[in-house]
Amino acid sequence: QGNETRTSMAWAGQPLRDVATQAGQFIKYGCGKGECGTCECMVNGKWIRPCTATVPSLVSGEELIVQVKAIKTKSKSSGTFFSFRSFIMGFWNNLLGMIGFVKFRKAAKKNWEERKAYEDLVAQKTLEKKMRKATGQA
């Protein structure tokens, strides 16, 4: 990163992320699958994603030059775990969730009662059919 140069040995087919770690070079990763592009590095003039790339086969004496993006400095934290506003917003969010749960529960209860009434009707009709069948054969 920046003007710092680090050197390491690697085998062909070795994951490039392992080689970077071995050299003590930090690369910021996002998804780890090569989809997000957070880890992109310049390798011999070509952009690659080291989270999925491997070291290619090289002729003896040939070097693989990897240039890592500079990492932005992290922003300072305010030092507080929560603010009054975040506390109020969390309370509001929980309240809305409870209201939604009550509304959903009322609709689910109505659905349950309809289903139970239908199943009772099916059980009654089945019992009547069995009774007719039993009296008809006797």
Image (tube, rainbow, N blue to C red):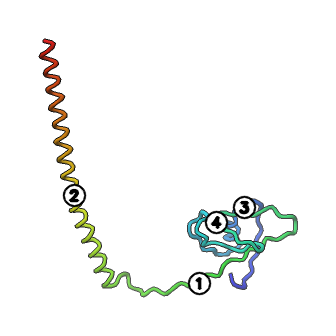
Cα separation between marks 1 and 3: 28 Å
Name the quarter where the C terminus is drawn.
top left
Compare marks 1 and 4 and give the one earlier in the sequence: 4
Cα separation between marks 3 and 2: 55 Å
Residue 40 vertical placement versus 121 (above, below): below
Q: Name the residue type under label 4.
A: Cys
Cα separation between marks 4 and 2: 46 Å
| Front residue of 30 and 17 | 30
Residue 72 vertical placement versus 114 (above, below): below
**Circle 3 Cα neighbour tier, 10 Å, few/some/many (<14 / 14–19 / ≥20):** few
Residue 73 locus on image (x, y percent): 57, 85
Q: Residue at x 58, y 68 (%)?
A: 36
Secondary structure under tag 4 reads loop
Name the residue beneath numbered marker 1.
Answer: 72
Residue 20 numbered tag: none
Residue 114 locus on image (x, y percent): 18, 46
> For this view, does 70 lie left or right of residue 109?
right
Cα separation between marks 3 and 4: 11 Å
Dot in front, 3 or 2: 2
Secondary structure under tag 1 reads loop
Name the residue beneath numbered marker 2.
Answer: 105
Cα separation between marks 2 and 1: 48 Å
Name the residue beneath numbered marker 4.
Answer: 51
Pointers 1 and 4 in contact (C-beta within 8 Å): no
Q: Residue at x 22, y 67 (%)?
A: 99
Compare marks 1 and 3 and give the one earlier in the sequence: 3
Work out which residue is located at the far right of the displayed protein and give it. Answer: 60
Q: Name the residue type under label 3.
A: Gln
> For this view, does 55 lie left or right of residue 26?
right
Dot in front, 1 or 3: 1
Q: Name the residue type under label 1.
A: Lys
Residue 98 locus on image (x, y percent): 24, 66
